[in-house]
């Protein structure tokens, strides 16, 4: 079952999230004669065959897990990684600002662990994501993560440095998660169709400043930068408050549109 297909029943090969509690959830697939080992005992994955998503299954120690159908959130947050991945809160704004929809063509750099690549491919398929990466080790990890999510048919993994140029033309968006996005701005302008979208994710404000100034100099319009903060609320009867721990900062998102 592909990530963007809905279904009710679990069969061999079905992707599944075994949910224990708010902090522990396990992304796997249903396989005969295989066990998922956890600190609460192991789950016989063959026991899931024939059940419906939402069903409970007990581990060897009698602890109940809920079998849930994975979402793109699970594939982003559970992806094995060699690099830090972009958080879903940032990806959500990116998807809306770029107007991602089926059929779009998007250039991405760098691929990293492929978490953002998965999200982009999920929204644009049957379109295409052309993802550039200079590190072959990162690219190998990304390929496995994208394949695990069932999205490899919508991704073309490319070895290359986009600061030296972008091969594609008339694309709908260029999305950058790299150290020097300002060096890519002129190449992004050449690659984008009229009105096409530019987006970059940067951990420091110095990177944002250089990128925004270059975007303005190259004639991009609607240039905006954002920081998104998200904190979970702990809800207990008589004691509702923000969680003590939170991710205080991930990065800054910069957006722009190509003017002819």
Image (cartoon, rainbow, N blue to C red):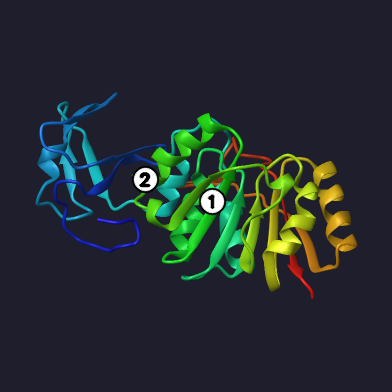
The quadrant holding residue 171 is bottom right
- Assign the C terminus to one quadrant of the image: bottom right
Question: Helix or strand or loop: what does disc 2 sit on?
Answer: helix
Q: Distance between the residues labelled 2 and 1?
A: 19 Å
The residue under label 1 is 88
The residue under label 2 is 147
- In the picture as drawn, the residue positioned furthest to the front comes out as 167
Q: Position of residue 206 (x, y in %)?
A: 85, 42
Image-based side of 151 in relation to 238, left or right = left
Give the label, 2 or 1, closer to the camera: 2
Question: Helix or strand or loop: what does disc 1 sit on?
Answer: helix
Image-based side of 62 in relation to 6, left or right = left
Q: Position of residue 4 (x, y in %)?
A: 35, 61
Q: Position of residue 102 (x, y in %)?
A: 46, 70
Mark toward the start of the polypeptide (2 vs 1) = 1
Image-based side of 133 in relation to 41, left or right = right
Q: Where is residue 196 in the image (x, y as percent from the top left)?
A: 68, 70
The residue located at (47%, 63%) in the rendering is: 123
For residue 188, above or below residue 47: below
């Amino acid at each position: 079952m592909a990530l963007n297909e809905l279904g009710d029943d679990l069969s061999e090969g079905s992707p599944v999230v075994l949910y224990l509690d708010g902090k522990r959830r396990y992304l796997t697939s249903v396989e005969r004669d295989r066990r998922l080992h956890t600190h609460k005992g192991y789950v016989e994955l063959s026991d899931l065959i024939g059940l419906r998503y939402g069903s409970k299954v007990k581990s060897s120690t009698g602890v109940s897990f809920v079998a849930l159908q994975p979402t793109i959130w699970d594939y982003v947050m559970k992806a094995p990684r060699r690099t830090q991945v972009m958080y879903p809160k940032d990806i959500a704004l990116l998807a809306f600002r770029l107007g991602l929809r089926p059929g779009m063509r998007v250039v991405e750099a760098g691929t990293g662990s492929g978490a953002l690549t998965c999200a982009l491919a999920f929204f644009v398929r049957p379109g295409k994501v052309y993802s550039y990466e200079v590190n072959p080790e990162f690219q190998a990890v990304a390929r496995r993560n994208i394949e695990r999510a069932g999205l490899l048919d919508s991704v073309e993994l490319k070895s290359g440095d986009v600061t030296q140029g972008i091969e594609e033309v008339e694309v709908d968006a260029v999305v950058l998660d790299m150290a020097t996005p300002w060096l890519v701005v002129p190449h992004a302008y050449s690659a984008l169709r009229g009105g096409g979208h530019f987006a970059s994710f940067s951990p420091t404000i110095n990177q944002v400043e250089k990128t925004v100034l270059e975007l303005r100099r190259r004639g991009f319009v609607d240039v905006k930068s954002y920081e998104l903060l998200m904190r979970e609320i702990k809800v207990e009867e008589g004691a509702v408050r923000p969680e003590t721990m939170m991710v205080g900062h991930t990065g800054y998102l910069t957006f722009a549109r190509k003017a002819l």
